[in-house]
Image (cartoon, rainbow, N blue to C red):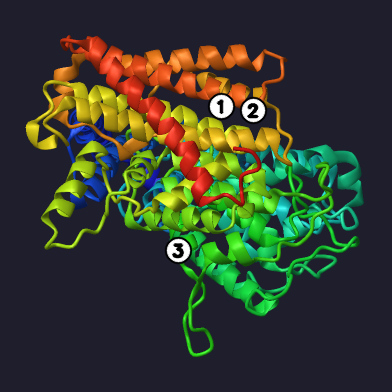
Amino acid sequence: MDFNALYHANFALLDDAVTDWSTLIKHLAELKKDAEDGLHKAADQADWVGVNAQVSKQFIGKTAGEFGDAHTQATTIHNVLRDTRDELKGYHRQLTDAVARGQGKHLTVMDTGDGGFTVTGNTRPDWSSDPSGKTSTTSQKDVDDLRDEIQRILSKATESDTSAKTVLTALADQSAMGFSDAAYKDRDAAAEAVKEADELAKLAKKDPDDLSVKDFDRLNAGLKKYHDDPLFSERFATNLGPEKTLTFWANVSDSQVSPDLTRERRDQLGELQRNLGLTLATASQSDTADMTDWKRHMVDIGDQPVHGKRGNILGFQVMSNLMRAGDYDDGFMRDYGKKLMETERKFTHDGEHFAWQRSGFDTYLNHMKGDSGWDPVSGYLKGLSNSPDAATDFFNDDFIPKDGDHKHAVSNFKYLFEDRHWPHESNSDLSEGGSVDGRNNLAAALEAAATGHPAGELPTADTPPHNPGQAKLFENIVSSVSDDNGRLTDHSYMSDSMGQIASEYLPDIDRATTDVDQHPDKSDGDGTAAWQRIQKLYPVDGSAADLDHREVTRFLFAIGQNPDGYAAVEVGQKNYMGKLMEYHLNPDLPADQRPNHDLELTVRDIARHSGQVSGTLAMGRNEAVAGPADAKDKDFDHSVSQWKNVLSGGIGTGVGVGTSFIASPVVGAGVGGAAGTATSVVLEELFKDAEGSAKDDAGVKMGQNWQSGLASNTKYTRRAAYEAANAYHLPHSGDVSTWAEESSSQGFQEGGNYMGQVGPELVTDI
């Protein structure tokens, strides 16, 4: 900070800027509220179809979110400008006071013209007649003290001004388009984040021999505190750089390289790995030029050796383990995955052999719960489970493209789900003697890819409708499991994800159970009309999956053999059935949205096809209890009962159907307080029965189990129809429940019988 600039500072323009930003914040707050309460909520409630369902609704949601980010960024900028202005005004007052006090002591402060200053004592008028020979009224100490005081003021002002510039530049650079969501209450908080990033990056660059336990603790604590901070994360990652990032984790996680750290902090390595991964994930969302280069370079060196102390490790092996936590930038995940699979293809000779097999002397790269981390595909798939859009593109991409040597392309999905030779992991506590994390991470990544939301979460109103890539992937999953049930039943731990996927494609699954041709010849008027009726019976928002009844049945049979998979689909199907009853029994449903003029036909169709799904699941459950798996029947009821905890007060919201079933706004307005009644009552009864059965230790014979399932399914369907009819005050609600009861029983038995026909080799006891 120049002496002259601060001494003669005019703060009028800075005052105006602070005032303008304050006014802007108020306007943006109003726009944010309007965008969320008006634009966004209206879009969620609108009856989107076709391209609008896939593009416009999602675009509006993101646009509404930009108003929130704009308000956040404007607030932070205002806070930084306000704090800096107030501080500079304070330093300006201190400087002018210091100069004035100096003048009182006959000291002169002069600008040297180059931003500097000098302090001199004034010459005495009578110096020539003074016998002592003193030419000044002040001492050298007075001169030095004033000089030092002014220098301290200028240094603090410089620090204030520089830190403000650093923070404001970093904020502006965070997002190439749109606004950053980085929020800071004041300038000091933002400046402290940047400073801490620089200091922690310096620690991480240390030679592992020089990295102390104290350094480890400071790194871990700092990354834990700031891993969600955009400015900190970008600054830390770019200062450390891709190579040093890989070297740091390769060294610190290796007991032979860092024995002291391993001995003293073994139990905290996983926490450090998670905090580092979350930090890098946040950084990856930044659009700064340095971070863009960081991501590109990290992909480039993925197949290169990491220059750690021991070597023998590739970049992909290290970085993939840091992807196990956090939501990484989709573009980075796509580029990384493409290069990783190119490396996999090279190392496995087009998938014919193993790769990434760890030997007993190789270090553990993963210290979070799970496998050793030697297989980079496992960690990458875990990362994909948090990045739905990137996951969809990845699985639909080619592992082996169609070319002169290959008559048929092999997708990443087919290779990983069907063909890959997974390396053996021996560090698991599982009884089968090996870690299952690789395939389990595959299932989680598929869940994200097919549903459009991170694995382990439920769909919300903001989850986009299924797009063509997601629907195509689900078709491939169903076909693959149908072709070989062992791809799922031999790895039953994958079924929780498969069950969640299926629960979000129930409209598509129910369509398939009707056996109506989804692609009728244009000249076949009756066939076209039949398919149009099914589309109205099971409305789909977005892209529908084209499924085959036989394949769907064999797929559901496999899912039904795992308690978690069974529960996800069974709860989802009961939820969906209740919603359909509420939707179609609503007297305000427009005539052009009704599949039949006769309400009885509609109720019977819903009940029958819902029963078929539950009957098929029951066959899978019976197979698990009676077959080689030797599962306990009460485990299935326990898994069903757990969904009550998952849904917690919002019974029926989200589970199973998600955004693939959206009633029109006309219906929503007509329903009023009646919406959700049938679904809530059915699920409450389902959970109550499941909780009771889960506590029953009495063994259930196969025949009894089947009959119990039939009776329960009929009861739930009957109740849903009755509650929906009663909520709308329809006459003869008893007749409506009778239609549902009869057709539900019929469908349940048809589901079991059909499974026996299309998969006799899979069924141990019908």
Residue hosting label 1: 706
Residue under label 3, please give it: 396
Distance CA(mark 2)–CA(mark 3): 41 Å
Q: Residue at x 18, y 42 (%)?
A: 533
Verify CB contact (< 8 Å) between mark 1 and mark 2. Answer: yes
**Image check: 415 left or right of 507?**
right
**Amino acid at circle 2:** Met
Q: Earlier in the sequence, mark 2 or mark 3?
A: 3
Contact between labelled residues 3 and 1, with CB atoms less than 8 Å apart: no
Q: Position of residue 334 (x, y in %)?
A: 48, 63
Using a 10 Å C-alpha cutoff, classify the residue at mark 1 as few (fewer than 14 neighbours), some (14 to 19) or many (20 or more).
many
Which residue is drawn at the image coordinates 74% and 45% (left, top)? 370
Q: Look at the image and tell me in which quarter the C terminus lies.
A: top right
Dot 1 amino acid type: Trp
- Residue drawn at the location 64% of the way across and 72% of the way down: 344
Report the disc number at residue 702: 2
- Look at label 3 and name its amino acid: Asn
Q: Counting other residues with Cα less than 10 Å from the Cα at mark 3, is it few (<14), some (14-19), or many (20 or more)?
A: some
Which percent across, then down, holds residue 514? 32, 44
